[in-house]
Amino acid sequence: MQDDPQKREIINRRHFSFRLNLFFFITFALFSVLIVRLAILQFVEGPTLSAEGIGKSTRSVKIPPIRGNIYDATGHAIAYSTSTQSIYFTIQPELKLEKATASAKEMAQKLFEIFSKYGDPAKAMTVDDIIRQMDLDFKRNNISTPRRIKSGLTNKEVAYFMENRTAFKGVDIMEESVRNYDTDSISVQLVGYLKKFNTVRENVDFYKEKTTEEDPTLRYLDEEDVGFDGLERMYQDVLRGKNGLKTYPVNNAERIIGPMEITNPTKGSDLYLTINKNVQLTTETAIMDQLKKISTSTNKYERAKYAQTGFAVAMEVDTGKVVAMASMPDYDPNIWSGGRISKEDYENFQNILSNGTIRTVYGKYSEEERNQHPSSILPLGSTMKPLSVLVGLNEKLFKTTDTYPDTGRFSYGRKGYETYIGNSQGKKFGYIDGAQGIQHSSNTFMAAMIGDRLYRRDPQNGVEIWDKYMKQFGLGVLTESGLPNETKGVIEYFNEAKNASSQSALVQASFGQQGRYTTLQLAQYTAMLANRGKRMKPQFVNEIKDADGNIIQGYTPVILNEVNYPIEYWKEIELGMSKVSSQGFEGVDYTYNRKTGTSEQQVKGRTAENAVFIAYAPADKPKLAVAVVVPDGGFGGYGASPIARKIFDAYDEEIGLYGVPKKKAPATNDAANNAADGADAGTETGTGTNE
C-alpha cells in the first residue's frame, strides 16, 4: 500500500509545529528560571554577596580595646587604663622582600631622627631598637600585621607625624590604653597583673582557646595586655572590651584604593570590689609593722627573729564579702607596665608575686634559704580546737557537761612505744570541759576526749569521719572563690594513718596538726564558726558596671554548704573562745570571740613556730571574721593577734561593726599594753606541741 504524500506532509508539519512549540516552551521556562534567579541574587542574596565581595577587597587592622577599671568599695581606682598615642609600622606588601627591608631600614633612620628631636628623652630609642620592633624577619608577625614601634608619644611627635604623614608611608598613629595601678599598692596580689598575649597564649589553656576566635572584635592582638593573675585574670572577659577596627579597601596588589573606615573600640566593664581601701592599707601596714616588731623584740614571748612574711584575710560573716586580703610583703604592680617585667625586678620580686593567702609563698628568701623556713600554707595549730570540740560533741564522744582530768600529759600507742602529748609549758588544768579546753588551749583534752575516743570508737573509719568534718568547714577543699591557682591546702592525716596509725593521725589532728591550709580557708572557717554553720563563698566584687555606668551584675551572697548542730554545741565553743587570752585587744569597746594558735613545723633541723589567730566580732551578732597567719611568728597571741585588732578597728571606723561607721578609737597606752602582755604570758607561752 502506497503512502499518500499529501497526508505524510500534513503529519510532518504537525510534528514540526509540536517540536517548535516545545522548543519555545523550554526556552521560555529556562529564561523564566534565569530571570527568577537573577531577581533572587539581586534582591535577596545581593546584600550578603556584596558584603562578602567588599570583605575580599578590604583589609582590617584591629585597634586594641580599652580595658575596664578596677575600683575599691568606695570608688577609689586601684587599676585603671589611660590613653596613649603609639606609632605603628606596616610593611608594604607590593615591594619585594629585599626592597621592603631596605625601605624599612631607611624609615627607621627617619623615625630615629624625629624621636630624638621631639620625643621624651626617657623613652629614647636607637635605630637598632626601631628595626628590632619592625620585626623584618617575621619572627613575631606576618607581613600584613602592623608593628608597634613606640608608645607614649609626645604631643610634638604626634603633631609632626600627622602633618607629614605622606612622608611616612606605612606609618600610623593609634590611640591605645595603658594599665596603671595605684601607687599605694592596694591588695596587689589579689588584683593581679597583665602580660602580653603572645607570651601566654601557648601555655595557658584559657588563652589558647582565644586563638580560634573568629569574631574580629573579640580576636586577641599579639601585643595586647591580658590578665595573668588575680582578678585581672579571673575577670578577663569582663574587663577586656572589644577591638576597634580600621578598615580600608585594597586592590589585588594590596594597595589602598579608598578612604578608611574606623570602628572605635568598646571599653570593657568596670569592677567595683568588696575590698575597702582604708581597711586594706591598715591591714598591710599592720602586718609589716608587726613583722618589724617581733623580729627585733626583746620580750621572750614576743620575739620571732625569723619572721619575714604575714598574711591576713577579713571576711564579712553573713555575706562572704572579703574587705581585706593582704599578702605581705608586696610590691609595686607598676613594674608590669606594658605587660612585661625587667629581669632585675623579676629577680627581686619573683617570690612574692603570688598571693600567699591562697597558695604557697615563701617570701624574699633565696632558693637556698627556702627549705629553712615555713611557707604560707601552715597547720592551724590551736585555732583548730573550736572545730575539734564541735566534732567531739556532734559525734557524741562527750557532752557539754563532761569533764576531763587534765594532768598536762597524755600518751597513746603500744606500751613501751608510747607517744606523749603535752600542754604548753607542761601546764595542768585539772578538770576541764570543752569550753575550758578551748580557753586554756589544752592539747591533752583534744587528744584524749576527741582524737583518741574517735579512734577507739571507730578505728577503721575514724580518719574518714574526721575528713568529712574538715571539708564541711572548708579545710582541704577549695573555698570556691574562683581565684586562679588557688590551692586546696595539704591534707596529711591520711598519710599519717597509712605510715603510722589511724590513732596517731586523729590524735595529732585534734589539736591542729596533720593538715596545712591557706589563710583564706582559715577565714572562711572562722566565718562559719561565727554564723553557726554556713560556709559562705568568698567574693571580691560588689558590682560590675558597663562603660556607661549601668549595673550589669550585682552582689548575691552564696552559701556553699550548711551544717546544723544543737545550739548548746555552738554556745560551748563560743564560751571557750570568749575567754581566750590574746594581746593587742586591750580597751576594745566591742565584744569578740577568738582563738590563738602556735603551729609547729620541722624545717632544716629546727622547729618553726607559726603564729596563727582567728577572731570574729561582735561576739553576740558577728559581722566580721578575721584570720591572720605569720610563718615563723611564734605565739599566735603575740605574733598575729595585734594585727587582727587593727583590722577590726579599721573596719569599725570605715564600715562599722554595729552597722554604722565610727571614729577610730584612741590608741592604747603602750606601757599598759606591755604590762598586759606580761600578765598574760602564762597562757600563751611554753614548749608544748601547740599553743
Image (tube, rainbow, N blue to C red):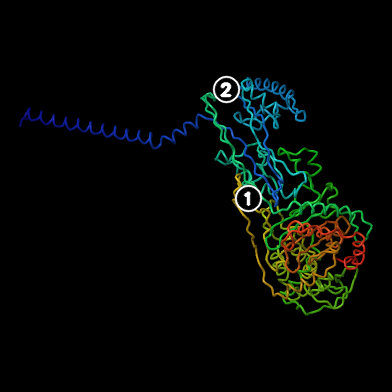
Q: Nearer the viewer, mark 2 or mark 1?
A: 1
Residue located at (75% from left, 41% from top): 334
In the rendered image, which quarter contains the C terminus? bottom right
Q: Is residue 601 visible?
A: no
Q: Amino acid at mark 1?
A: Ile
Write the residue at 80% across / 38% down: 344
- Point out residue 484 in the picture as x, y percentages from the top left corner: 69, 51
Q: Residue at x 60, y 45 (%)?
A: 548
- Residue 165 x %, y %: 62, 23
The residue labelled by disc 1 is: 544
Residue 467 percent across, percent down from the top left: 71, 66
Going by the picture, which residue comes out furthest to the left? 1
- Residue 665 falls in image quadrant: bottom right
Q: Position of residue 386 (x, y in %)?
A: 77, 69
- Judging from the image, what secondary structure is the residue with disc 2 in? loop
Q: Residues within 10 Å of mark 1 (few under 14, many from 20)?
A: many
Using the image, tell me which numbered label, if any, was put on residue 94. 2
Label annotation for residue 503? none
Q: In the rendered image, which quarter is residue 611 located in?
A: bottom right
Q: Amino acid at mark 2?
A: Glu
